[in-house]
Amino acid sequence: MIPEQHLAKFTTALPFWLSLLLIPLLWVSAQAGGWWVLLVPITTWYLFAGLDAVLGLNLENANPDTGDESIYWYSLVTKIWPFAQFFTLFGLIWFVTHTDHLSVGATIGVMFGMGVLAGTIGINYSHELMHQKNKTERWMGDVLLAMVLYSHFRSEHLLVHHRYVGTPRDPVTARYNEGFHRFFPRVLIDSFKSAFRAEKDMLARKDLPWTDLSNPFFRYWALQGAMLVLAILLGGWIGALLFIFQAYVAIWQLELVNYVEHYGLTRKHLGEGKYEHVKPHHSWNAAHKASNWLLINLQRHSDHHYKPDRRFPLLQNYTDADAPQLPFGYPVMTIAAMIPPLWKQVMNPRVRKWRGMYYPEITDWHAYNKAQNPQPR
């Protein structure tokens, strides 16, 4: 157990601030042009993967009952990031559309790096913020999602994913043997539809139509429209296209992580649309130290599903006795996910082992593999 007085120190929280260094790195790449534009993707994907190999695992846990005053330095970085990302994104849109030293390829490369930043860090931080009870933090999460045109992720995640993970109703649970190239287009469509349906159903229970202004989709569309207009004002139609491009890259990064987090892990159908409760073994976990710094402990995913509003420094690590473990951190696993034969070679045997460990009584997995079990009630 990490002593609370040690946890409260800024120096203890400092590794989680490493994400802020990616912003000047992105500006350096934009100034330098050429192959330098690959600095941010190389850093987030390969440098942190290398650091994981060197630094190993972090198996320590903080006291989950630690008060907010002791984790001030951790939550502060998530509150700083929305402002940092806003000025970086729109500053870059203005810069790349008003300079003549960047080739078309380099310009695309800069905005690709921006998308990696907005997806790996920005959407991840929005995920942390949207789970908090504080309205200001939730608004910050909305602003971050609007910057990548994926505002409905909040509704889908809070109202659908956490309730129905591991069941046919959750579009984000990747099915066994489903390659990412099939998962990605499916989840883009199904997540929007399920998020909209969830909000519509909530309003219907209050005898209100979906067109009622309390529907958060109106806020989502307004924020996204404002971001797009700002991109046009700063960079014209080229600025708008670059804004949309970086949003697409960010969404791709998010859905790669979503694909990894629950691949092949399903909750047992108990009959008549009833499913077992979510348990730690319904999420893949990774205790790799460096990538958990970068991703603010997102890889401690089992505990997040157990206690969704628990702030990231207090998320608990689970051993392989309680939850399945990934062989590498997310940086390596998301690269593997882009190569379906490699992914299936690494992960399918692990899923089969998991099934034998937790559900030896199930002999026919066809309905689970194809998400053909009854919809949860």
Image: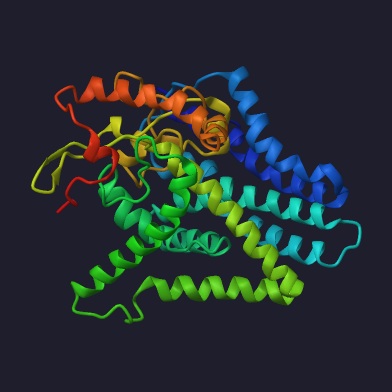
- Find residue 231 and report its image quarter: bottom right
x and y percentages locating residue 111 in the rendered image? 71, 55
| Furthest residue in direction right, as rendered | 101
Image coordinates of residue 14 in percent, x first then y, are 61, 35
Residue 324, position in %: x, y?
35, 25
Residue at left offset 44%, top offset 21%: 59
Residue at the left extreme, as displayed: 272
From what the image shows, is residue 308 above or below residue 3?
below
Q: Is residue 291 above or below residue 164?
A: above
Q: Nearer the viewer, residue 86 or 274?
A: 274
Judge from the rendering whether residue 32 lies leftward or rightward of residue 363; answer left or right.
right
The answer to whether 256 appears left or right of 271 in the picture is right
Q: Is residue 189 above or below residue 373?
A: below
Q: Which image quadrant for residue 92? A: bottom right
Q: Answer yes or no: is residue 133 visible.
A: no
Q: Residue at x 24, y 68 (%)?
A: 202
135 shown above or below 131: below
| Left or right, residue 296 beside residue 311 | right
The image quarter containing residue 277 is: top left
**Colouring used for the render:** rainbow
Residue 135 in sight: yes
Quadrant (top left, top right, bottom left, bottom right) of the N terminus: top left
Q: Number of callouts in the render?
A: 0
Provide residue 86's location: percent of width, then percent of height.
64, 61
Residue drawn where x is 42% and y is 55% of the image: 130
The quarter of the picture where the C terminus appears is bottom left
Nearer the observer, 2 or 311 = 311
